[in-house]
Image: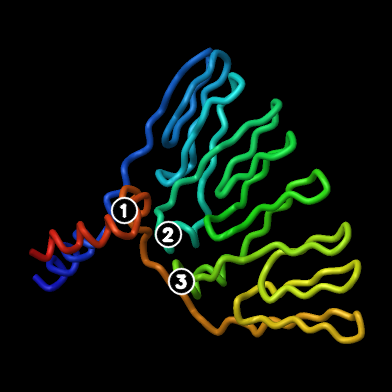
């Protein structure tokens, strides 16, 4: 009996991950999630947290990194694809400017244009696991033609340096720049990912649903 009860508890705790689907078109078949077709392609995302978009008659799919799935931002986890002048980029916080397009790999990343090019930067998955939705927004700083993104950025006349984590520190000494990031000592282990429909919701909606269930 204890083994039966334990199995029931584990089953009840498992997230409602939908099964993949398969879609056939134009003589080919693709299986996965959020499948889309164009006049010549069929593609699917690899996880139920991903998305696919048709741009310029091509299907583009993107899947969030595991850390972003387990720690969705307050506004919800919603990857996207953007296009400009035939160029397509997929991810988060996409920036389209001066004929360029680029996206961060995580919702905690940042993109900025500098000298006609768009640079995107993301904190590491370890940092996302450690801070989650409380992770401070990184910035991109420029000096001359140089650009760097991260935290506590410092500049000289022609150079810029940034720490890679919110706990990092950068210093400027006689026009010399240096940064240090203490290692993360957090051990973050997840047994299973949250349900896809939950991570897409804004934090306020998640709280409303939790309150309604409690009542």
Vertically, is 62 above or below 147?
A: above
Report x, y in % for residue 88.
65, 33
Element assignment for label 1: helix
Q: Of the numbered discs in the image, which one, if any, rests on residue 68? A: none
Residue 24 vs residue 52, the one in the foreground: 52
Q: Determine crowd level at label 3: few under 14, some 14-19, many 20+ residues with C-alpha closer than 10 A.
A: few
Gap between marks 1 and 3, in whole Å?
A: 18 Å
Q: Is residue 155 left or right of residue 97?
A: right
- At x 42%, y 62%, the residue is 70
Residues tagged 1 and 2 counted as in contact (Cβ below 8 A): yes
Q: Quadrant of the C terminus?
A: bottom left
In the rendered image, which quarter is residue 171 located in?
bottom right
Residue 138 vs residue 88, the one in the foreground: 138
Would you name the residue on which mark 3 appears?
134
Q: Determine crowd level at label 2: few under 14, some 14-19, many 20+ residues with C-alpha closer than 10 A.
A: many
Gap between marks 3 and 2, in whole Å?
A: 10 Å
Q: Quadrant of the N terminus?
A: bottom left
Would you name the residue on which mark 1 appears?
198
Residue 6 vs residue 132, the one in the foreground: 132
- Choose mark 3 or mark 2, whichever is in front: 3
Report x, y in % for residue 23.
42, 23
- At x 21%, y 59%, the residue is 208
Report x, y in % for residue 48.
40, 44
Q: Earlier in the sequence, mark 1 or mark 3?
A: 3
Q: Determine crowd level at label 1: few under 14, some 14-19, many 20+ residues with C-alpha closer than 10 A.
A: some
Would you name the residue on which mark 2 appears?
72
Report x, y in % for residue 157.
90, 70
Q: How many marks?
A: 3
Q: Earlier in the sequence, mark 1 or mark 2?
A: 2
Vertically, is 63 above or below 187?
A: above
Q: Earlier in the sequence, mark 3 or mark 2?
A: 2
């Amino acid at each position: 009996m204890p083994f039966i009860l334990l199995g029931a508890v584990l089953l009840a705790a498992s997230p409602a991950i939908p099964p993949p689907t398969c879609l056939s078109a134009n003589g080919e078949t693709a299986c996965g999630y959020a499948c889309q077709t164009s006049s010549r392609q069929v593609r699917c995302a690899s996880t139920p947290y991903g998305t696919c978009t048709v741009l310029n008659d091509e299907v583009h799919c993107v899947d969030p990194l595991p850390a972003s799935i387990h720690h969705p931002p307050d506004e919800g986890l919603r990857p996207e694809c953007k296009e400009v002048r035939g160029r397509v980029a997929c991810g988060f916080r996409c920036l389209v400017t001066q004929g360029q397009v680029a996206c961060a790999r995580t919702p905690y990343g940042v993109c900025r244009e500098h000298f006609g090019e768009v640079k995107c930067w993301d904190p590491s998955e370890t940092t996302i696991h450690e801070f989650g939705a409380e992770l401070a927004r990184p910035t991109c700083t420029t000096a001359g033609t140089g650009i760097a993104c991260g935290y506590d950025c410092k500049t000289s006349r022609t150079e810029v340096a940034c720490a890679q984590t919110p706990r990092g520190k950068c210093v400027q000494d006689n026009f010399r720049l240096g940064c240090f990031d203490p290692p993360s000592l957090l051990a973050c282990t997840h047994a299973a990912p949250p349900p896809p429909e939950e991570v897409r919701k804004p934090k306020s909606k998640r709280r409303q649903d939790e309150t309604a269930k409690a009542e």
